[in-house]
Amino acid sequence: MAIVHLPASALYSHPSLARLWKEVHLNCSPFYQRPAVRRLYTQPATVLRALLRHAPYNFVALGCAEGLKESLLLRKLPKPTLLLTADTCLSMAKIAARKLPARAKIARQIDLASPSSISRILMPPNSHSKTKAPRPPRLITLFGVLPNLDPLPLLRCLAKNMARKDLLLFSTNLAPGKNGRRGALRVLPQYNNPQTIRWLRAVFQRTHPKVTRGSLHFGVYRDTTQSSLSRIEARWIAGNKPTHTLFSSRRPTLSQVESWIQTSGLTCIHQWIDPKGEEGIWLTNRKA
Ligand SMILES: C[S@@+](CC[C@H](N)C(=O)[O-])C[C@H]1O[C@@H](n2cnc3c(N)ncnc32)[C@H](O)[C@@H]1O
């Protein structure tokens, strides 16, 4: 029987699940454990300030949760004119909008797995305003989302919806080293902890309330759409057989991220990689 893959949005589909994810993040994430990973989210500020040149800009935070990483970055940037926070979990996007600084703010629900949902958020229908003032450039952030979603269609779709002057700053987890599988196996123990297990069991109970037996197993597998890409999966095992993939975190190598950028119609302006090679952040714009 084929393994059923839960969509990433199911992991955050109720405020109680979002709270459990937050607990995982606070207790287990390298972002809290290692200052070098936190620094990744402030380092782009110098390059961004030079590119934005004190001119007005809009800030779009995609898959932002409560906007923690964006707040680190925005502390070092001029206040944006307009802030748009968007996440599958609207309650988290609203918290992010309250927290982050901007002259005007909007919070929206978005499905980053759906091209039409992305277009609705990034290319809103022309307003009826009579002024034809050009829109300021946008700084679009996408932090911590690429591991959960199919990366190539998402990056392609974002590139298509970007104007020439827009900037996309995205982060992703990495498989340290040159060999994806070996690198993913090295970071695998980071996932097998009581908080992550509690969160994923709660996800399974909410989505499959009738299934009472089974256990969680963490392993490294090939990505279904890109076989050279390794991904860490949490699988539900019942009767010795995997029945569901509850969670997956893609772990590309550096060269795989570079090829995603190339093939998505983006150009890399700058990249910052954590010293252990487990996470990186890329500043890109649309190819001319
Ligand atoms: C691993 S968390 C990262 C959150 C935050 N950006 C960070 O880096 O700490 C993934 C985020 O993506 C959101 N998300 C997952 N699937 C989504 C989807 N299909 N559309 C929009 N947001 C999604 C989740 O609600 C969550 O906020």
Image (cartoon, rainbow, N blue to C red):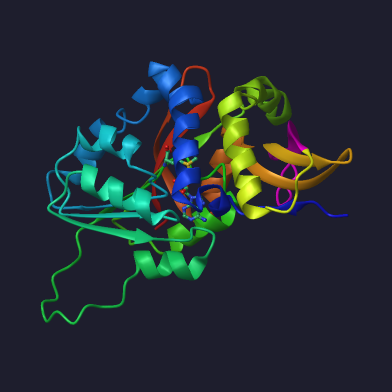
Residue 239 horizontal/vertical position (percent): 89, 41
Residue 96 horizontal/vertical position (percent): 29, 46
Residue 146 horizontal/vertical position (percent): 52, 45
Q: Could you tell me if residue 231 is visible in this image?
A: no
Residue 46 appears in which quarter of the rendering? top left
Q: Is residue 68 left or right of residue 3?
A: left
What residue is at 75 percent from the left and 41 percent from the top?
Answer: 236
Report the quarter where the N terminus lies.
bottom right
| Residue 68, placed above or below residue 26 | below
Q: Could you tell me if residue 129 is visible in this image?
A: yes
| Residue 187, placed above or below residue 162 | above
Q: Nearer the viewer, residue 279 or 72?
A: 72
Q: Is residue 6 left or right of residue 258?
A: right
Q: Nearer the viewer, residue 40 or 71?
A: 71
Residue 192 appears in which quarter of the rendering? top right
Q: Nearer the viewer, residue 253 or 214?
A: 214
Q: Is residue 65 magenta?
A: no
Q: How many marks?
A: 0
Q: Is residue 229 magenta?
A: yes
Residue 193 horizontal/vertical position (percent): 61, 24
What residue is at 20 percent from the left and 64 percent from the top?
Answer: 135
What residue is at 29 percent from the left and 47 percent from the top?
Answer: 95
What segment is highlighted magenta in the picture?
Answer: 215-230
Report the quarter where the C terminus lies.
bottom left
| Residue 90, placed above or below residue 200 | below
Q: Is residue 64 left or right of residue 243?
A: left
